[in-house]
Image (cartoon, rainbow, N blue to C red):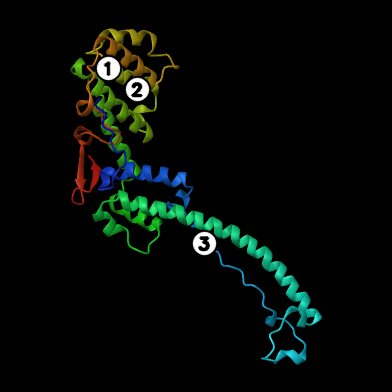
Amino acid sequence: MTLPIVRDPTIILTNYLSYTPWLLQLKIRCNSLDLWSKVDPNSTEEATPKPTKPKLPHVSEYELPPNLRNNRNHAPTASDLTEDGITAYKNDVESYKMQLEAYKLDDKEYREEKINMDKIVMFIQSTVSPHLMRNCCQPGEPARQWIRSLMETVGVDEEEERERARIRYLNALKPMRQASNWDTWLAEYDNAATEAETEKVAEVHQVNDVKRDFLAAVMKVAPSWETSFQEVGRRDKSINRKEMMKRFREHMSHHHPKRQLNGAFADHPPDRYEATAEAYSGIRFWNGGQRPVTC
């Protein structure tokens, strides 16, 4: 029996193209450990400081009777203290006990957070290319500074990311040419539309616009389905993009079934972050090809 290939979903940060998905997986990892606010470059919340263990009161620090104050051959005990000394000593011992309990709780929280922070550091080390690691992540710097340096080096701002997602989405809407490739086309469309929704691209704000554009793209290869959906689903507010795709997939699976391939020959639809070359047409580059600028 041939086992299906399992692809490693981990994103390796190598340049600006992988920055957004890499940052997303880092945020997911940090949120699961309740740490993102403490490593986010845009946050001011600091990591939990290492607590200071309270000092145990020592009898020699309290009032002794005159005959024992300068007696170096006698180690004083609590019973040697004056009445005022005993009162002060007992009060400080009780205060010490309460401080010690608070310290234990703080120390437990600190150690747990440090263990989790070490996990984030190891995650960054294992998912950042050696070149970026060498230039952006210096020993002794906190994880927040590492992320800030990576952001400054290969980060993409929201407008750039939105424009890139928009271009990919518009390219995914190019009319399907052959019904035989409907599944590949649909997979790229779904990934591009999902990314456009995430980046809040204007073209996907209104579901009626999304439906209209989708129908125009599939009209040539599925005219009967397009006509039918125009009549019953185009204005139906209960039908969203996912439901529309589901109905289209069912129609195409029935009229154009795909032959199932095994093992290494199985088709793998494009990942959300495996943008095609067409998705970047219309983008020019500066800074040695490291960052995009929309035309």
Can you give x and y, in whole percent of width and height, for residue 283 in the image? Answer: 21, 39
Specify which label sits upstream in the sequence, 2 or 3.
3
Label 2 residue SS: helix
Specify which label sits upstream in the sequence, 1 or 3.
3
Distance, label 2 to label 1, CA atoms, is 10 Å
Q: Residue tagged by mark 1? A: 216
Q: Amino acid at mark 1?
A: Ala
- Of marks 2 and 3, the one in the foreground: 3
Q: Amino acid at mark 3?
A: Pro
- 37 vs 177, left or right, is right
- Of marks 1 and 3, the one in the foreground: 3
Query: Are dots 1 and 3 in contact, CB under 8 Å?
Result: no
Q: Residue tagged by mark 3? A: 49
The C terminus, quarter of image: top left
Q: Amino acid at mark 2?
A: Val
Q: Residue tagged by mark 2? A: 210
| Residue found 28% across the figure and 47% down from its top | 13
Can you give x and y, in whole percent of width and height, for residue 131 in the image? Answer: 24, 55
Q: Quadrant of residue 292?
A: top left
Label 3 residue SS: loop
Query: Are dots 2 and 3 in contact, CB under 8 Å?
Result: no
